[in-house]
Each structure stands twice: as structure tokens, then as C-alpha cells.
Image (tube, grey):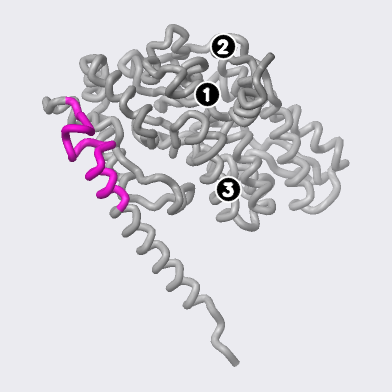
Amino acid sequence: MTPWWLGLLLCQAVLAYESDQLTWRSERLEDAQPAADAHMDQLLARAVAAANQESACQGSDAELRWVLAREVERVLGDRTQVHARGELPPMTFGAYAAWLEMADLDRHTFSGREDIYGGVEWRQNLLLATVGPCSTIRMGDVLVGTDKIDHFLVQGYLYFRRSRQGQDPARAVRWGTFTERSFWGTATTKVFSYADLAANYDGYTFYAGLLAPGSVLQRDERGCVVQDRLWDWSEWIDWQYDEVLNPSAYRPAILAEVNTWLVAHRDEVCEAWNGEPWMDPAARVSSLLDSTLPYELQDAPMRMDVFALDRLCGGEPPCDPEADPSCPGSVPEQSRARDRDRDRDRDRDRDRDEHSRRRKPSPR
């Protein structure tokens, strides 16, 4: 019999898969996007038919958008068991992401636990030790975990609901940051994923924009929903879904295991890192450290380049947070990152206040 506390943990962990785009990065996967786009079209057709039947093609755009969003999430996000993933049966995927896990696609499954979390013991984190990361696939030129598609389709819909159907996106982002800090992130796997938040926000944008100009789903002259063009994941997925280029924040125990893995796989990692000059990975990571993005809030954990691959692959000794104060995870580095985030948040709040003052009507 499963203990009550384990059942509660697993129920909360439906979207708590982590992903790994670092292991075997130099081994180029075949592009899964053509097949993924085609399957998306098939499922969207089912959602469109259901929305038209429920609405009878009547109502305002806002009313039909709400019906359509519900049907899209129901069809593509329906919880589906993937028995090959890990040892804990309650872990599930949405229907579309489950298809990505089971279809005849080229992917890294990490079934032998060769991933960056492979050294994590159950005492450190039950989910990472027993379930491990989801699969990694290639969509166009982007390596992405299948969990990001769930975040787009399932969490994006929840963002849409939390935002009062697009009226208050900041409310949704606050909620999403809370869930990533708690039961869909830090509290369950001890990992806070900024790439998850990027996918959440893109999914929200997709749902909030349904039937609007530019959306793949439009209304025809009868008022019914039709698919205006074929689905194309490249319109949404970009390098910020890649957790090497948009690194997560780790709790110390997990960071220590990741650093151990990096040292053991230095040659493999650096072959991949130095083989991507077209992407300029170091510059991309650096740009995020100093950016304010719409999907993150000031209560998100401080950003750090936890892999420090430019240092690792530049001939310097591997980082040891306990011995080297310049390493990610060390107390001085955390302090500097906290100061950087505090200054960034202060500037953002100042700009927001200034904007509010400009918009505030003068008293009569």
C-alpha cells in the first residue's frame, strides 16, 4: 500500500518531470518536428470539431475562445500513462506529450540513467532518483524535453484560466512562478526550471490568442472554427526551451551531483559545447542572466550559469563551489547573483511605477 504522503507527492508531480539537453548533446537527433506537426494537426482537428459541436458556431469570439481553449486542452492534455517512463506509475503526461514519448521518433530516453541526474540518490530526491528526466527530442534546431510540450499545452491553459481568459497575464505568471517553486518544481525535484516558465508563457499566449489575427485557428463565414494553416512548432519553440542555454536553478544537493557528472563527462560535454559556435551558447546564457523576461518574476530564484561550461571547456579546472568563490553555487556567487537580481527588480519596479504615473489621470 502506498503511504499517504507518497501518494500526495506523486499526485502533485504530474508535471514535475525534469529534462536533460546536455547528455549526448553532440549526437545529433533526427528532427521530430515534421511528425510532431502532423500529429498536432490531427488532434487540433478533433478539438475544433468538439468546440464547433458544443458552441453550434454561435457566440462572441470571447465565448467561443473559451470553449475552444477547453477542448484543445482536453484533447491534447488528457493525462496519459507512459509505462516505459520510470518506476512510479502515477507519473503521467498529457496525451500529446505522451505520444512524443511513445511514437517512432528519434529521442534520448535516458533509460539507463546516463543523464545528468543519474547520480542522485533517493534520499536526495525521490523523483529524480527513480523516475529521472523525460525524453529529449529535436524540434527543428532546438533540443527540447517532452515535458516542455506539456507545459505549453497544459500549464499554458491553466495560465489562460488564471489570467481570467487573458485579462490579467501577470496573475498567471505569479501563479506559474509559485507552482515552479513548489509542487511542480523546487519542492518535488529541487529544480526550478526557467525553460518550464518560458513554455508556460508561450502556451498562455497561444490560448489567449485563439481566433485572433495570426492564430492558426480562425472563424469562417458561418462562425465556425477552422484551422487556417498547418501547425508549425517553430513558431513557438526557440532556444529558451533548451535547459543548457536557459539553465535551471538547483538546490545544493542536486547541484553537487550535477557538478560531479560534469567532471566525469567533461570531454563529451565540451565536444558538444565547442561544436555549437553557430549558436554562441555562452552569449545566450549570459544574455538571460542580465535580462528581464515576461515569464519570470522577482520571486523566482536567482539566475546563475550553473553549468559554467565556458569555464569548464576553456581549460580551467572544474568548478568546486566549496573551494572556489567564483563558482555557481558558492556562497559569494549566490550573494552576487542575489544582489544582481535585487538591482534588476528595483529597476523594473521603478520603471513600472513611472509607467503607472504617466498613465494615471490628473485630478479634475
Which disc, if any, is residue 146? 1
Image-quadrant location for residue 153 = top right
- Upstream in sequence: badge 3 or badge 2: 2
| Marks 3/2: CA–CA distance | 30 Å
Residue that carries the numbered disc 3 in the rendered image: 175
Q: Does residue 142 appear in this view?
A: yes
Residue in the picture at 37% in, 27% down = 254
Which numbered disc, 1 or 3, marks the residue that appears first in the sequence?
A: 1
Q: Which mark is residue 37?
A: none
Can you identify the residue that label 2 sits on? 87
Q: Position of residue 165 (x, y in %)?
A: 68, 51
Callout 2: few (<14), some (14-19), or many (20+) C-alpha neighbours within 10 Å? few
Give the foreground label among 2 and 1.
2
Q: CA distance from mark 1 to mark 3?
A: 22 Å
Queried whether the magenta region covers residue 337, the answer comes back as: yes
- Three-letter code, disc 2: Glu
Please state the horizontal and vertical placement of residue 290, each as a whole percent of the image. Answer: 31, 50
In depth, the one of 317 and 127 nearer the eye is: 127
Quadrant occupied by the N terminus:
top right
* Residue range highlighted in magenta: 318-338
In the image, what residue occupies the spot 48% across and 18% down?
132
Mark 3 is on which residue type?
Trp
Task: Work out how far the residue at label 2 is from the one at label 1, CA to CA, in angstroms.
Answer: 18 Å
Crowding around mark 1 (Cα neighbors within 10 Å: few <14, some 14 to 19, many 20+) is: many
Viewer can see residue 139:
no
Q: Nearer the viewer, residue 93 or 113?
A: 113
Query: Disc 1 residue type?
Result: Thr
Within the magenta stretch, is there residue 32?
no
Say left or right for 84 vs 288: right
Q: Are marks 1 and 3 in contact (CB under 8 Å)?
A: no
